[in-house]
Image (cartoon, rainbow, N blue to C red):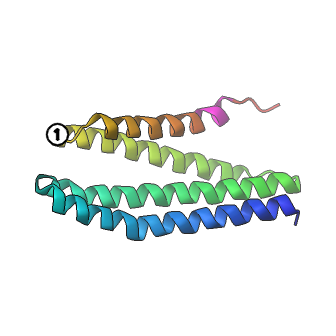
Amino acid sequence: MRRSTAVTLTVGLVALIGTLLVGQTVLPSWGRSVRAMYPEAHRIVTPAVVWGIVVLACLQAVAVIALRLVASARAGRTATGSARAGLVLLGAVLVQVVVGFVGLSWLGFGQPGVMLGLIAIGLVCAVGIAVPLGRRSP
């Protein structure tokens, strides 16, 4: 294995472990502190924490697939199944962003900072889906 591939895989593994830590410890802790500071937000805290964990899980899967695609490209192989799976997972994140956007608006928690963050995540996912689909194979 080349050194650059090993470094990339190590960085990817550290990032996956970090997001796992965030999803399992930081998000629930954040939920408890928000519930304590803002009692009126109690009905949205649990769905927000679950939504964050699900989105992190999908993005972790996308990261694993991207690392697999990098390793396949370095070896000179193609992995169309992995690419399709990555696009499907990005689509799942995009659907979750839309549901989060509509749900927050409907419940009256549509502050600009949250909505702009959702819009940014949605745009990144949309570009991640559109770029590979817009390329023509020779």
Give the residue type that dot 1 points to. Gly
**Secondary element type, mark 1:** loop
Q: Position of residue 35 (x, y in %)?
A: 19, 61
Residue found 72% across the figure and 59% down from its top:
68
Residue found 73% across the figure and 63% down from its top:
9
Furthest residue toward left: 40
Most frequent secondary structure within the magenta stretch: helix
Is the residue 133 above or below the residue 70 in the image?
above
Assess whether residue 133 is covered by the magenta stretch.
Answer: yes
Question: Does residue 44 appear anywhere in the picture?
Answer: yes
Question: Horizontally, is 42 left or right of 18 in the view?
Answer: left
The quadrant of the image that shows the N terminus is bottom right
Residue found 66% across the figure and 36% down from its top:
132
Furthest residue toward front: 37
Q: Position of residue 52 (x, y in %)?
A: 38, 56
| Snapshot quadrant of residue 44 | bottom left
The quadrant of the image that shows the C terminus is top right
| Snapshot quadrant of residue 113 | top left
Assess whether residue 67 is covered by the magenta stretch.
Answer: no
Question: Horizontally, is 47 left or right of 129 in the view?
Answer: left
Q: Which residue is mark 1?
A: 108
Is the residue 77 above or below the residue 31 in the image?
above
Question: Does residue 77 appear anywhere in the picture?
Answer: no
* Residue stretch rendered in magenta on the structure: 130-134
